Image (tube, rainbow, N blue to C red):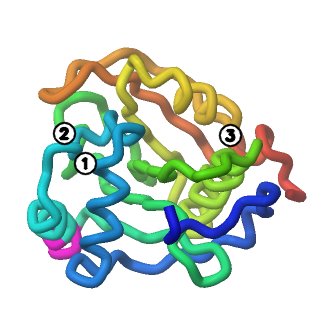
Amino acid sequence: MKDIPERGRAPAPEAFAFRPVDPAADGELLHRWVSHPKAAYWMMRDLTREDVEREYAAIAAHPHHDAFVGELTGRPAFLMERYDPRYVELVGLYEPEPGDVGMHFLVPPAETPVHGYTRAVITAVMRELFADPDTVRVVVEPDVRNAAVHALNAAVGFETVREIAKPEKDALLSVCTRKQFEDAVGAAR
């Protein structure tokens, strides 16, 4: 995909920057990413570009949900969503704690994958979330069948809490504190 920077070697997590999604301007890009077969767990493969723009316009208007494009050298590289699990995604499915922040991320497929790239992305995402001093713990709820993301989550410090039944999927509720993240990736990195 031409919109993704070349991946000769995995960048350092600090090489990524974040900007809010612009639903209209980013609609084509996001549609391409979420409708790709490798994005099956996002459950948006059958949406039109207009549907995707509406979804991200609703997120942009929501007081407890945000979406960001992660960029590398000024070019779109991944998608991140941040949400307050007291109001979005996990309402009634677990007991949220003060400082909990929910997260989703999507790295679109590359023509030439680079070992460590997605791990650099999730590390950058976690750093971005923990840059807010009010964030105590990051909460995720990936599909139970998504073994690749479970391994990535574990690599950055996530601990599985339990399986939960969401309306659209069976999910693996997992949490990561700031300390778990720093222990997993090394505080100096």
Rendering quarter of residue 59:
bottom left
Any part of residue 62 in sight: no
Magenta region, residue range? 57-63
In reply to whether residue 101 is colored magenta, the answer given is: no
Indicate the amino acid at tag 1: Arg
12 relative position to 170: left or right? right
Numbered circle sitting on residue 156: 3
Q: Residue at x 17, y 32 (%)?
A: 92
Numbered circle sitting on residue 86: 1
Q: Main secondary structure of the magenta part?
A: helix
For label 2, the residue is 91
**Nearer to us: label 3 or label 2:** 3
Compute the Cα span from label 3 to label 2: 25 Å
Who comes first in sequence, dot 3 or dot 2? 2
In reply to whether residue 59 is colored magenta, the answer given is: yes
Secondary structure at badge 2 equals loop
Residue 40 image position (x, y, % from top left):
32, 35
Are dots 2 and 1 in contact, CB under 8 Å?
yes
Residue 78 image position (x, y, % from top left):
50, 61
Numbered circle sitting on residue 21: none
Indicate the amino acid at tag 3: Val
Rendering quarter of residue 150:
top right
